[in-house]
Amino acid sequence: MTTDRQTTNSEGPPTPFGRALCAMVTPFTEAGALDLDGAQRLAAHLVARGCDGLVLSGTTGESPTTSDAEKEELVRAVRAAVGDRVTLVAGVGTADTRHTVDLARAAAKAGADGVLVVTPYYSRPPQDALEFHFREVADASDVPVMLYDIPGRTGTAIATDTMLRLAEHQGIVAVKDCSYDLLGTQKVLSRTDLAYYAGCDEQILALCAVGATGYVSTVANVVPAHVRTILDRYAAGATREATAAQLGLTDLIDRMMNSPLPGTVTTKSLLTSLDLPAGPPRPPLRRAPRETTDQLRSAYDRLTSSLT
């Protein structure tokens, strides 16, 4: 699967990793071990329903609680399951530049087509240090880099000027955008060829309207075909129908992503109720209460029944 920066739609933005990417959860067994068979089955399920890329070991994939070896095993197992039909992007971001470089190299060897590098968290590096971090990883990586801008979780935004400079690096090709800074996003889109992916499900259509490539979606774990519909309708010029598809997701997005519980927990709860591989989250995260699971399932059932 090519991830050349110049890979483009004939009438759209660059697509280095595809357009419809799912931030896949990492299935565990009831005992808390890595469930590679479950990961392969879930990956195949998502690809069959419209995902043309999978992000493994992101924070939705519980990267803080999986070992380096488990991250490699996960990439190898999923690659074996889906072959070259889709791109695999491996989350490698940590608060340690050297560790991030090591993870990026290991991910490439395991079969990843790209790496997702989040802003270092907690230490809140200034912009010059942040730029150095991303450049060091990109220089050392054998595959292209997707930056992950999520200041609400990391405490540090990638400033617009920093993003513009990073866009000049040949190995930095994309951004997962959870910045909630539409003006900053538009500035970068208007002045670079970076591929932007909406990282917040409620912003998929809005960002596509200003030139984003697609999404890295958590909600796509449970309704991959419906989330894909937003992109397909918009690309076809059916903007009213694309709007209807985006608005149709509102209740489910709200319950999954605007809950007091992390999206990993709500997603795994709903997947389990659908008899899809997920398993429990690893501590300190805990399973969702039964009442929450019932509410999530009701929202899912309302959405899917409206489509039939």
Image (cartoon, rainbow, N blue to C red):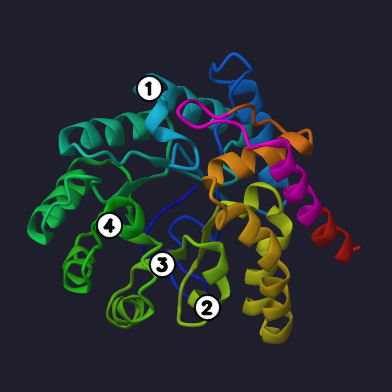
Residue 206's mark? 2
**Going by the image, does 153 lie left or right of 282?**
left
| Residue positioned 27% across, 57% down in the render | 172
In primary-sequence order, the first of circles 4 and 1 is 1
Label 1 and label 3: CA atoms lie apart by 29 Å
At numbered mark 4, what does the secondary structure look like: helix, strand or loop?
A: strand
Identify which amino acid the numbered label 1 is placed on.
Ser
Q: Which residue is mark 4?
A: 172
Task: Give x and y (percent) for residue 169.
Answer: 20, 60
Task: Give x and y (percent) for residue 146.
Answer: 35, 54
**Which numbered disc, 2 or 3, marks the residue closer to the eye?**
2
Q: Are marks 4 and 1 in contact (CB under 8 Å)?
A: no
Residue 196's mark? 3
Identify which amino acid the numbered label 2 is placed on.
Ala
In primary-sequence order, the first of circles 4 and 2 is 4
Categorize mark 2 by other alpha carbons within 10 Å: few (<14), some (14-19), many (20+). Answer: some
Q: Is residue 294 magenta?
A: yes
277 vs 125, nearest the viewer: 125
| Residue positioned 55% across, 58% down in the render | 258
**Which numbered disc, 4 or 2, marks the residue closer to the eye?**
2
Task: Give x and y (percent) for residue 37.
Answer: 64, 22
| 15 versus 139 height, above or below | below
**Which numbered disc, 4 or 1, marks the residue closer to the eye?**
1
**Going by the image, does 139 lie left or right of 82?**
left
Can see residue 43?
Answer: yes
Tell me where residue 193 sits by quadrant: bottom left
